[in-house]
Amino acid sequence: MVADKFWDVVKKFNSLMKSAIEGPDCLDICHGDCCSIKIDIPKILAEEYIKQGFAKKSDFIRSDVFSFKLRFDEKKAKCFLFDNSINGCHVHNSGIKPPQCWIYPTNFSNPENKEISCKRASGWKIIDPDKSKEAEALLQYYIFLCKLEAKKEMKNINERLSRSISEGHLRKSLKKASPHEISGFKDNWDYISILLAEGYSLQLKKYCQRVNKQCDFLKCSSVCDKVTTVLINFLQQNLFDYIKSVDYGPDSGGEYPIIKLKKVKKEKLGKKKEVFSG
């Protein structure tokens, strides 16, 4: 992605939509209902939010639509950029607010001049249709640039995986957790780490008992060295095939469950048998 083109698109889009729409004062009518939308953004925008102090790396979750999803607080049902003190988006006046967040509730056109309402109030208007139409065209170009970046960023997974292994990050994270806490692996900003289960996970039971038949799986406090090595090798051998598979969809969040990695491995073995038997 050419950075200059990207920033031209984002800043121009923000400027166009800010002057093309008009509505009631959100501070008086609600508590950020529109901030309950889950949004994907490119890495270049995430990096700028971090640089300007709006966010930190842990506020972004891997996606394969664009590069990242904005962290969503399920308890508050709000995007992490929601700011209670202003009752709205923390980056609303930054000039680099995510373009998707400008569209609700007006969209880009209202040819029949219908009354436009959000969840709480009516009175929204498109006061400059030409600007909103120009913004609509810019959004398509923004999406194109974001998808290009996402493809490049996904290719860097090899670098993140190699770094996680060479620097010992993945091995350390495995050894810090109990086997029954682990359900897979997770792609973070810089490293591949473990994916913790919501309850008890039995995904490692066979690996542990294959290495040590006397293993008391549920009472074990740490993944042993032998199982750690087996798991890292398993991830290296099957991760890229999983990413290419149908199971790796837009809602994966960069999560690689062991059960799905195993499925990919079985499919690979099945194809090999077909080749040899043929």
Image (cartoon, rainbow, N blue to C red):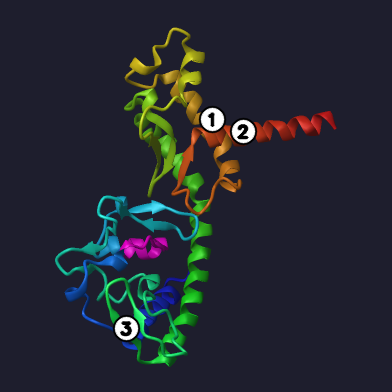
Q: Position of residue 125 (x, y in %)?
A: 34, 87
Q: Is residue 35 magenta?
A: no
Residue identifier under label 2: 265
Q: Nearer the viewer, mark 1 or mark 3?
A: 3
**Distance Cα–Cα, label 1 vs label 3:** 54 Å
* Category of crowding for the residue at label 1, using alpha-carbon neighbours closer than 10 angstroms: few (below 14), some (14–19), many (at least 20): some
Q: Secondary structure at mark 1?
A: helix
Q: Is residue 70 left or right of residue 247?
A: left
Establish if 242 lies above or below 72: above
Q: Nearer the viewer, residue 38 or 213?
A: 38
Q: Is residue 39 magenta?
A: yes
Which mark, by number, is residue 234?
1
Q: Position of residue 202 (x, y in %)?
A: 45, 24
Is residue 200 in view from this perspective? yes
Q: Nearer the viewer, mark 3 or mark 2?
A: 3
**Distance Cα–Cα, label 2 vs label 1:** 9 Å
The three-letter amino acid code for the residue at tag 3 is: Trp
Q: Nearer the viewer, residue 153 or 211?
A: 211
Which residue ends up furthest to the top in the rendered image? 214
Which mark, by number, is residue 124?
3
Which mark, by number, is residue 27?
none
The three-letter amino acid code for the residue at tag 1 is: Phe
Q: Earlier in the sequence, mark 1 or mark 3?
A: 3
* Category of crowding for the residue at label 2, using alpha-carbon neighbours closer than 10 angstroms: few (below 14), some (14–19), many (at least 20): some
Is residue 167 in view from this perspective? no
Q: Secondary structure at mark 2?
A: helix
Establish if 234 lies above or below 148: above
Q: Position of residue 7 (x, y in %)?
A: 39, 75
The three-letter amino acid code for the residue at tag 2 is: Lys
Question: Where does the magenta region start and end?
Answer: 36-48
